[in-house]
Each structure stands twice: as structure tokens, then as C-alpha cells.
Image: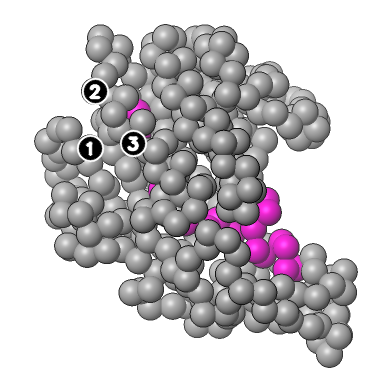
Amino acid sequence: MTNNESINNMFFQKSILIIGGTGTIGQSLIKHLIKCSPKVIRILSRDEYKQFQLQQEYQNHHQMRYLIGDVRDGSRLVRAMEGIDYVFDCAAMKHVPSCEYNPYEAVQTNIIGTQNVIQAAMANGVSKVILTSTDKAISPTNTYGASKLMAERLITAANYHKGSHKTIFAAVRFGNVLGSRGSVVPLIRQQVLEGKEVTLTDGEMTRFMMSLTEATDLLLKAMEVATGGEVFVLKMPVLKIGDLIDSIIELVVDKYGVNPAKIKIRTTGARIGEKMYEELMTLEESKSALELQDMFLIPSPFKEYHLESARPAKCMTYSSIDQPVLSKREINQLIDSII
């Protein structure tokens, strides 16, 4: 997806801030960006231990800086963005049950935190800010999705109430990132290895899935081409949760010699706020969306948008319920390296 030369040139000797940089996506961004010889990469997060681990891993890289802080603290963000060119906002409360039981906490991080990022970026003359969003922001049925939808709206609108400020704001919309912290693959693998009961919500649920590399490439591509107000959506495969669970169990049994007869699966039903399928683009959004080979680009409703390499998207809802699902063999190939 990304043009390595253009990405390298973009970040060469630039100052970068990754908010939520100790998370799975943040750490993947670091691995890509460090190769571009940036002037500095600042990591802002609440996780002191994860920052310590990163310091050990990158102790020979003089560009790295580590800041303890929270998107809820606007003044901390202002200080963290001093002299920064590019901001990747990967901070979020993202677990559906946690957001359901603690809705105002989700509001403070995902909504108020996003507005704090916007204000700090404008105050410091940051060049570009890219927000990470989610498929759950489309027709949301849970607090997490609703809060990220509001975050998207804030990012889009920021381009048009920024006055004389030059900062460009845009967002990327992720599906489920395979192998990310707290996701289903490491959870089920651990349950099988520890001899615990494997929990399955509903085998017929369908989900969009993307690899960590694809998620990282989408962020870098968005940072490169954003002109203000866009939402970038990667085209990605769809799978059934039941098929994914079967593949995880099969691969764990093969790789670690677990006795399959001892594995028990318990169906729990959908968790509060969960949907049977996910959407990445609404019908209304598709009417103005542009389609590229590997992604959709949803332009801001506030301005005309033209991209020579793109064509108008089909008028449709981009939903996991309408897409062909991966076969078991394809799922095995997709997850084999992270089992």
C-alpha cells in the first residue's frame, strides 16, 4: 500500500508524536518510522511499564522520547506537541464491555481527549494529525462506537473551524486488528494453552479483519495523502467468528501439542453492545466516497474533493454481512504467524 521512498522522505528529520504509542498499533508505527531517520519520535501514554520495555528495546536510538501523560490532560498535550510535525492519535478506550460499564470514562478519553488533541495541535502549528477510528463507529450500538463516531466528527469539523491554523486533520477507520492486545486470537490461544474453557460469543458473527502491517500501512498512507477531513477505509477480508475460533484451536493443537479432546467450547452469546456484523461505510457515505485499489476514501462533506487515481465508489453499505467470508484454509494462512 505504501510507497516506501515517499514515506521515508516525508518523515526524514521530522518530529513525530505517537499518542498511545505503547499499544500494539503504536509499537508497530515505531518500527516503521524509526527506519525513516526522523528527528524525534515522542511516545505519550499512561503505561509506565510498557514505556520501560520500549526504552530497553530502543536504547540505541537517540531519537526516542518517552512522556507519561493522558489525552484527558489538555495542558500535557500542548507541552508534548511542542515542535512536532506529525501526530498519530492511537489513544482510546476500545474494549466494548469496559466502555458500556464506564461510559463517561469512554467519553473523557475518546471524545474530550480527541478535542484536546485538536486544540493542542492547532496551538503548536502541527502539520498533520491522523486519528484512529473503528468500524464500530458506523451505526453504533455501543458506547465505544458512539464515542469514536463523535471523535471522527470532531476531527472532520476541526478542519473548518481552525481559522488561520494550518493543521490538517483526518481519520482512518480500522476493522479488528489481528493479534492486537486484548483481541480474540491471543485470548483464545491462551485459553487453550492454559486448559481453560474456550469462550465463543456467537459463531455466526462476521467481522472485518486486518493484519497489523495493513493497519500500520493505512495510517502511514493517510498521513501522506490527507488534505483535510477525510476518513480512510481499508478494503479488508471478512470472517466468521466460529471459523476463526476453530482455526485458532487447530493451529494451537498442531504447534503446541495440546490434546484436542480436553478442549471445551462454551457459547456465551453476544456481549452487551455487540452486533452480529460490522460496517465500515454507510450507504450515505458511499454516495460521495472515492475508491482506490486497496481502500475507500470518504471525503469531508464540507469541501469538494478530487483525486486523479480514484474513481467514484459504488453506492452501497460496506458491511461484513454482505461480503464473502474467508475459508478455513485462508484463515489459517492469515493467523498462522501470530499463533
The residues tagged by marks 1 and 3 sit, at their Cα atoms, a distance apart of: 10 Å
Earlier sequence position, callout 2 versus callout 3: 3
Label 1 or label 3, whichever lies nearer to me, is 3
Q: Of residues 214 and 264, which is closer to you in this image?
A: 264
At numbered mark 2, what does the secondary structure look like: helix, strand or loop?
loop
Is residue 183 found inside the magenta-colored segment of the image? yes
Percent from the top left, x then y, of residue 8? 45, 32
Q: Would you say 315 lies left or right of 172 here?
A: left
Few, some or many residues within 10 Å of mark 2 (<14, 14–19, 20+): some
Q: Secondary structure at mark 1?
A: loop
Residue, x 47% and y 32% (percent of image)?
111
Kindly identify which numbered label has been placed on residue 130.
none
For residue 153, the mark is 3
Which residue is depicted at the point 65% across and 63% down?
Answer: 184
Q: Which residues are the magenta region?
A: 169-189
Q: Label 3, secondary structure: give it.
A: helix
Q: Which mark is residue 160?
A: 2
